[in-house]
Amino acid sequence: MPNTTVPSDGGNRLLAALPPRVRRWLADDLKAAVLNHGEVLFEAGEPIQSVYFPDGGLVSILVPVESEKVAEVAVVGREGMVGLPVFLGADIHPHRAIVQAPGPALRVSAKAFRAAARRSSVLSELLLQYTDAFLVQVSQSAVCNCLHSVPKRYTRWLLMAHDRLGSDRLPLTLKFLAFMLTVRLASVSEATSALERAGLIRYRRGELHILDRPGLEAASCSCYRLIRDYFEHLP
């Protein structure tokens, strides 16, 4: 039997942390949306039209580097929101947001979201705390990618995706993982085989299953635990 501890509760955690009266302010503007694999929610250098609160999907925040190359700087799921620059006062941002795993979400226009944040000090305070945790993810992931081995980086990414998707099944390919980690495909294939031999995961073309969550945590570096702890301290 799989030894996993992924939370079973649904719903976007950031929205769930809001007091009922603040949620009511947003209720009329929130619209149900479906995040489709490969969908670009906003493009680098273009206006951000909407803010998204995922509930089950996974979104990568990417920085275009050169030609068609990009580097992932963060992943967002049900713990947070996509479109944080809107809260920080930016209409245009140099990052791209693309859906890596499909799922439901709630969407609100950038204009309505900015107005709600100005109106509610409670919402603004929560968003400031989320911003702090998000920036910790970005900075710690960058340090991890520079200093740690591919297997350590790989397990850290899997654990973060597991937390944000809320599912033991991760719909992804090894080519995608190599792309996100900016390493050779052969390195990811070797790390995958090692994790399979250890009984921690099972991979079939286009789909990875988490089998032993505690084992993955033991195999990961301290970067994952630092990032996790920051998000767990959110309301």
Image: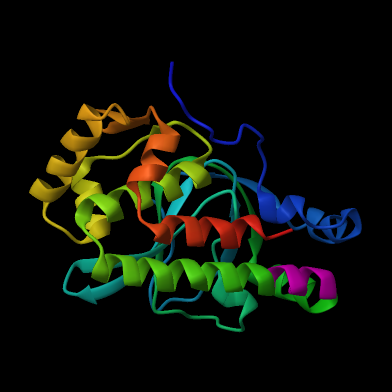
Q: Quadrant of residue 171?
A: top left
Is residue 122 shown in magenta? yes
Q: Is residue 56 above or below residue 181?
A: above
In the depicted view, which residue is nearer to us: 83 or 192? Answer: 192
Residue 106: where, in percent of width, then height? 64, 50
Residue depicted at 25% across the width and 58% down the height? 181
Please report the residue visible at 37 percent of the width from the left and 52 percent of the height from the top. 156
Instruction: Name the residue nearer the viewer: 56 or 105.
Output: 56
Quarter holding the C terminus? Answer: bottom right
Q: In terms of image quadrants, where is residue 80?
A: bottom right
Give the side of residue 28 with respect to residue 77, left or right: right
**Which residue, as the protein is rendered here, is positioned at the far right?**
21
Left or right of residue 8: residue 21: right
Residue that extends furthest to the top in the rendered view of this protein: 1
- The vertical placement of 155 against 223, above or below, is above
Stretch in magenta = 121-127
Query: What colouring style does the render use?
Result: rainbow
- Which one is nearer the viewer's eye here, 123 or 41? 123
Residue 191 coordinates in the image, percent (x, y): 18, 43
* Residue 205 in view of the camera: no
Residue 15: which quarter of the image?
bottom right
Q: Is residue 55 left or right of residue 169?
A: right
**Magenta segment, principal secondary structure?**
helix
Q: Looking at the picture, how far across and down is residue 69, in whole percent?
A: 19, 68
Q: Nearer the viewer, residue 62 or 132?
A: 132
